[in-house]
Amino acid sequence: CVLGACNTGYRNSDGTASNGCEVDTRTTVTHCGACGRTCSLPNATAACAAGGCTVAACNTGYADCDGVASNGCEVDTRTSDSNCGVCARACTGGTACAAGACGAMASCAAIHTRFPALASGVYSVDPDGVGTGAAAFDAYCDMTTDGGGWTLVGTVYNTSPTDTRRWNTDTVFTDATTFGTLAARSTDDFKSPAYARVNGRDLLVVTDEYHFGFRSMMSGSASFGAYVASL
């Protein structure tokens, strides 16, 4: 007996006539569409359907968001800001994806670095990380002045009748107390939780008429409150 022709969809991949056309190239992962064509897809378990490679399952933490089999499960949903946890779930408002969930970033500088197109405004920040330590809080972020990415730590307001003169003791400059409100920061004294919680290197001072700053004034591993207290 010799092999004449294989039935549709089958191939004689081992070259042995006695077992005929032993491979179904329509469904066999190691002979998908042709003998010896093995399906191997990034971050996925591959399958063969109708002679073409397909995604059978994605590896843990990955997803096939574009529906294109050839690039496998192309998205890491643990870290993708546009596909956080699942496809098409985008992190917004300056939050970033970590472990498959959108959460606040450590500072306005971190937000600006990751999302440079965001405008100045109020964003949630969590200096010690989401789910650890103290809770996140809202902070004003200046995303334009002198390169942008500045976290507001406080304001001093010296005009009556709303001036409350709260920056009036040495301890106020070195402890972790807060006062005022973010909403009223431009009409009254304000001390943000960022004063004692956000680590930095640079200090920017802004007045109604001008601004000036100090680069690499601090180590980057301590807050402005800790820096003042150390002196």
Image (cartoon, rainbow, N blue to C red):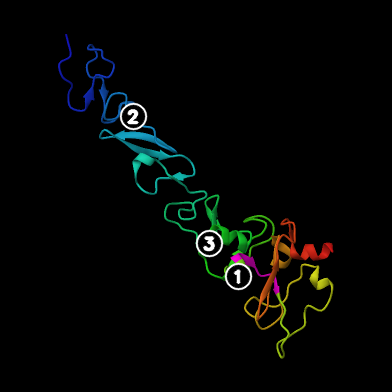
Gap in Å between the C-alphas at discs 2 and 1?
Answer: 57 Å
Would you name the residue on which mark 1 appears?
Answer: 145
Q: Is residue 112 above or below residue 63?
A: below
For this rendering, which residue is in front, 27 or 108?
A: 108
- Can you name the residue that lies furthest to the top here? 1
Image quarter in which the N terminus is found: top left
Residue 116: assigned label: 3
Name the residue rendered at 49%, 44% in the picture. 61
x, y percent for residue 154: 70, 73
Q: Is residue 170 magenta?
A: no
Residue type for callout 1: Thr
For this view, does 193 lie left or right of residue 60? Answer: right
Q: Which quarter of the picture shows residue 184?
A: bottom right
Q: Are discs 2 and 1 less than 8 Å apart at CB?
A: no
- Over which residues does the magenta segment extend? 147-154
Q: Which quarter of the picture shows residue 94?
A: bottom right
Q: Is residue 131 above or below residue 213?
A: above
x, y percent for residue 85: 48, 51
Name the residue rendered at 37%, 49% in the picture. 66
